[in-house]
Image (cartoon, rainbow, N blue to C red):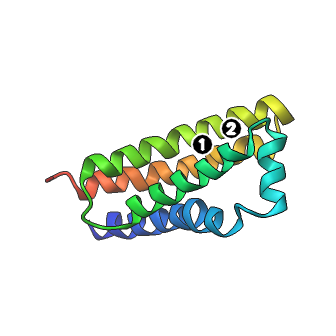
Amino acid sequence: MKKNKIAYWITTSLIFLMEGVMPALTSQTKLAKEGISHLGYPEYFGNALVVFKVLGALILIIPKLPRKLKELAYAGFTFNFLFACISHGAIDGVNFQTFFPLIVLAILSTSYYNYTKLNTNN
């Protein structure tokens, strides 16, 4: 149980930092806006994406929120990472940027696995 708790908090904290804190701090930079534009998305999509990333990250990191809400956040991030992989692959071809979202998805999956192990009684 302690091993699951440690793994959960490490992986969830990584997701919180990568998908909550970093986008909140960097979303309005020129580089971030160029990245969204490069993939063919309008600027407002990037802004909406950041809002939902920050909300999802907060939902994952705040203890004692309803399980259904946390599972929706996990599902949202899963779709986000899968579609990021597809977008980068379609625009840039196969390279590291194509597979990086899958690495983050593996971290998210580890967080979810440990979350379910810790909350099997709920």
Q: Nearer the viewer, residue 118 or 83?
A: 83
* Residue 85: mark in rendering: 2
Q: Residues within 10 Å of mark 1 (few under 14, many from 20)?
A: many
The answer to which quarter of the image holds residue 62 is: bottom left
- Residue 95 x %, y %: 83, 41
Question: Pointer 2: residues within 10 angstroms few (<14), some, or many (20+)?
Answer: some
Going by the numbered disc 2, the residue's amino acid type is Cys
| Front residue of 5 and 14 | 14
Total number of numbered labels?
2
Helix, strand or loop for disc 1: helix
Residue drawn at x 31%, y 49% as measured from the top left: 69
Q: Position of residue 119 (x, y in %)?
A: 22, 55
Labelled disc at residue 66: none
Residue at 55 percent of width and 55 percent of height: 51
Q: Judge by depth and name the residue closer to the eye, 5 or 44.
A: 44
Amino acid under disc 1: Phe
| Mark 1 to mark 2 CA distance (whole Å) | 6 Å
Q: Residue visible at 45% across and 55% down? A: 56
Residue holding disc 1: 81
Please identify the quadrant where the N terminus is shown: bottom left
The residue furthest left is 121
Residue at point 74% right, 46% down?
43
Could you tell me which secondary element the residue under label 2 belongs to? helix
* 2, above or below 90, in the image: below
Question: Does the residue at mark 1 contact the one at mark 2 (Cβ under 8 Å)?
Answer: yes
